[in-house]
Amino acid sequence: MSETLPLLDVAELSRQFTVRGTTGGLLARLRGGAAAAPKLHAVDDVSFTIGRGETVGLVGESGCGKSTLVRVLTRLLDPTSGSIRLGSQDLTHLPARRFARRPERARIQMVFQDAGESVNPRYTAFDAIADPLRRLRRLRGAALRSRVETVATQCGLPLALLPRFPHQLSGGQRARVGIARAIAVEPELLVLDEPTAALDVSVQVVVLHLLARLKQELGMSYLFVSHDLNVVRLLCDRVLVMYLGRIVEEGPAGAVFANPRHPYTRALVEAIPQIGAEGAPERIRLGGEPRSPIDPDPNVCRFYGRCPRGFARCAEQMPPLHEVGPRHRAACHLVEGG
């Protein structure tokens, strides 16, 4: 039965933050209405799945909620509501403050954007990779050293570099340490938060090839968060497009890039630099400012005001995700009914 379940099943997930120090918050306190303090809706009613062995890309501009969603999924933050299931196990009831010490921590690991910033500067490369093995696998001595050396070799990190500290390693070497640390405990899901953003272009290609090889060899699933749509198009099976806390389009990578159905997705795709694009149709130009994520009107499309195709209904009814193709959905009234 469990083999038929998706590896990750996220249902109606939300994360809100109380906004303090604002005029609205002050008025709420003066009126004795602490419950009415303004809320920032960083992640708002998000649902999606990731299959076993699947790579799913998560894209959207800065401030759309990607980082908060990732922190909730990896249990660094507690959700406000909704559920997170990894296989048959519900992770939602495990508080974030306790999750780091639970055996379930090994099942979902994260590769951070800048390994130099996410690794303890007092740890050698060996200790950085060994740390989760000590905490989650209780390995010691020869068994610990053997496992660290095995994953370092898998990630192309020379064993001679294991005694070095982060500042003694190149950017590419630090990235390999971060990846080795994440896969050391044999996770089922690897969350990659802009894993190549801090690297030179030539090193990015090498690291991306490494990630593709490890996925094939180890059978992991990936959630790949990136601003680089070309990388997402090449690496991912499916794509989630996020805007102001909500998923506005999801579908197979080929379909989303070839035929984006939401105006925001289309604007993102058309912004990808292309060689020899003379004579191409005019690109969508997004005007206006994004709507405020603080207590947003639940009846108004989040993209309303910037959307060049918005009309009256968009200001009166939040569009749900409509089926627009096989496993392809978009939250836009203009695509209702396919």
Image (cartoon, rainbow, N blue to C red):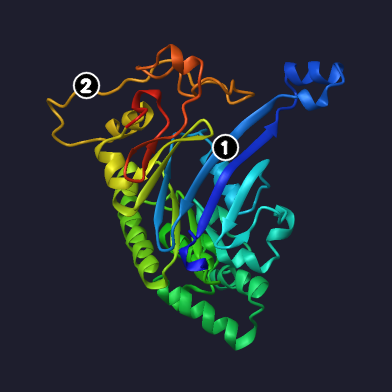
Question: Alpha carbon of mark 1 to alpha carbon of mark 2: how far?
Answer: 33 Å
Label count reads 2
Q: In this view, does 238 lie above or below 98?
A: above
Residue 160 in sight in this render: no
Q: Name the spot of residue 230 as percent of width and height, x first.
A: 30, 45
**Foreground: 213 or 300?**
300
Residue 78 in sight in this render: yes
Q: In the image, 36: left or right of 296?
A: right
The residue wearing badge 1 is 45
The residue wearing badge 2 is 282
Q: In the image, 215: left or right of 246?
A: left
Residue at screen point 21% across, 36% down:
274
Residue at screen point 52% across, 65% down:
182
Tell me the quarter of the picture where residue 331 sits.
top left
Tell which tag, 1 or 2, sits nearer the viewer.
1
Q: In this view, does 73 lie above or below 30?
A: below
Q: Name the spot of residue 51 as percent of width and height, x first.
A: 44, 58
Tell me the quarter of the picture where residue 185 sits.
bottom right
